[in-house]
Amino acid sequence: MGIEPKKHDMPTQSPVLRSRNFEEVALGYEAKTAVAEAERCLNCKNQPCVSGCPVHIRIPDFIAQLKAQNYEDAYRIITESSSLPAVCGRVCPQESQCESKCTLGIKFEPVAIGRLERFVADYHNANDSAPVEKPAPNGHKVAVIGSGPSGLTCAGDLARNGFEVTVYEALHTAGGVLVYGIPEFRLPKRIVAKEIEGLKALGVKIETNMIIGRTLTVDELFADGFEAVFIGTGAGLPNFMGIPGENYKGVYSANEYLTRSNLMKAYLDNPVTPIMKHGKVAVVGGGNVAMDAARTALRLGAEKVSIIYRRSMEELPARKEEVEHAMEEGVEFLLLTNPVEIFGFHNPDVPRDERNGFVRSIRCVKMALGEPDERGRRRPSPVAGSEFEMPVDTVIIAIGTSPNPLMKNTTEGLTVNARGGIVVTEDGLTSREHVYAGGDAVTGAATVISAMGAGKTAAKAIMRQFGIGE
């Protein structure tokens, strides 16, 4: 019998049902399907898929164990490299990373590596009850600032090698962007909590409601006996377009909108924090965050949700799967379109730049694509005479984020670049001795797995600093 040319389908909730609930959309493989998908792997000798993984999981090896139904052995292989396998199996863009290197993909669809990683992690979490063996302490203390993917990965790798690690999180719940940014229907919070509990079992301490730079400074961490510090504070500062009307009530950054829903539970009938739940919603942007915001708006009760993106579907940066899910759920896509002004209900006697009434409409202009820009994407430009106005009640700006300047402004000797990212060496070392950084705080907004790779790199460098490990 030959190799199946296509991946095994991932079962999902029906679009009609899921567009009005926050339960996970993708339901996961059953064991029989996972084994059948694993049998598609060619087990290549040179393992090209590994080169596409930022944390270098031994992919063919774990798939071979899965195929033999040795699920715990498969999990052990994955966790040699990844501290968050159940997370990565759900949210990593495997299609542009490990799966893009799959040899099978030359002729057929590549092996569904992400779906298999998810199956293995979920199987382990559901069936394993063995206590985690805590490593012997090596006598060294490291502070990790931020509990997102880079911070948790760095903390996990260090803890496994005997370091005493304390993670400081500014918010009241650990997980960083995994809990405040990614919706429940894509990444259930119980999954993140389970991964964090595993790190705690290794001895990692997590302190929430701790804003380093305000509650404590980096200097005070060193004074408290920490011998190295890793900064993984992410890129939580939202970007705006700078168009008139962005100060109207009902205009949100995607960060604020998703945080209110995901972390503050604004979807409840009587929420602690308010959020616009009804009417027409416009989401500006075309990345994964824009898809998350649009699909969240549907679930909160919006009657119509429109994605406004200035390029075409071909340039849309969001994952193909997320775009398909949004379309199935009824999200409208206004492509080659760009907002130029937001209008609201207001007192006409108030100066225009001070108006802050509620949103009533958004004016857009159609765009045409020209020559490629410095990143190879065709540059959009407005089409003369194409402006139009559409009624909306809520506008969500999802055009990217930048690193928060708090660390730069409170940590002496820390060098940042023009975009606000912390400057580091290949090992993650900053311009200050014994202070490391990685993830979105360095690169700006990127993927979960690339942030994890940066956390892993920094952990190795910290271990070398003390002559431990490799």
Image: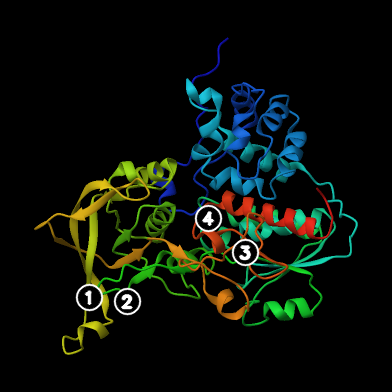
Mark whose residue sits in front, 4 or 2:
2
Residue 194 at x, y percent in the picture: 69, 54
Name which residue type carries label 3: Gly
Q: Closer to the camera: disc 3 or disc 2?
A: 3
Tell me the distance, in whole angstroms, between the alpha carbons under discs 4 and 2.
Answer: 26 Å
**Numbered circle sitting on residue 249:** 2
Residue 327: percent from left, percent from top: 34, 44
For the residues bearing labels 1 and 3, Cβ distance under 8 angstroms: no
Residue ID at (54%, 63%)? 180
Q: Label 4 sits on what residue type?
A: Glu
Where is mark 1, residue-wise? 344
Q: Earlier in the sequence, mark 4 or mark 3?
A: 4
Q: CA distance from mark 4 to mark 3?
A: 23 Å
Please determine whether, in this image, residue 50 is positioned above or below residue 394: above
- Along the polypeptide, which appears first: circle 4 or circle 1? 4
Residue 198 can be seen, yes or no = no
Looking at the rendered image, the disc whose residue lies closer to the viewer, 1 or 3, is 3
Q: CA distance from mark 4 to mark 1?
A: 31 Å
Of badges 4 and 1, nearer the viewer stands: 1
Q: Say whether marks 4 and 3 touch (CB < 8 Å).
A: no
Look at the picture and state if 9 lies above or below 156.
above
Q: How many marks?
A: 4
Give the SS element for disc 1: strand
> In 3D space, how far apart are the residues under numbered discs 1 and 3 (Cα atoms)?
38 Å
Using the image, tell me which numbered label, if any, was put on residue 232: 3
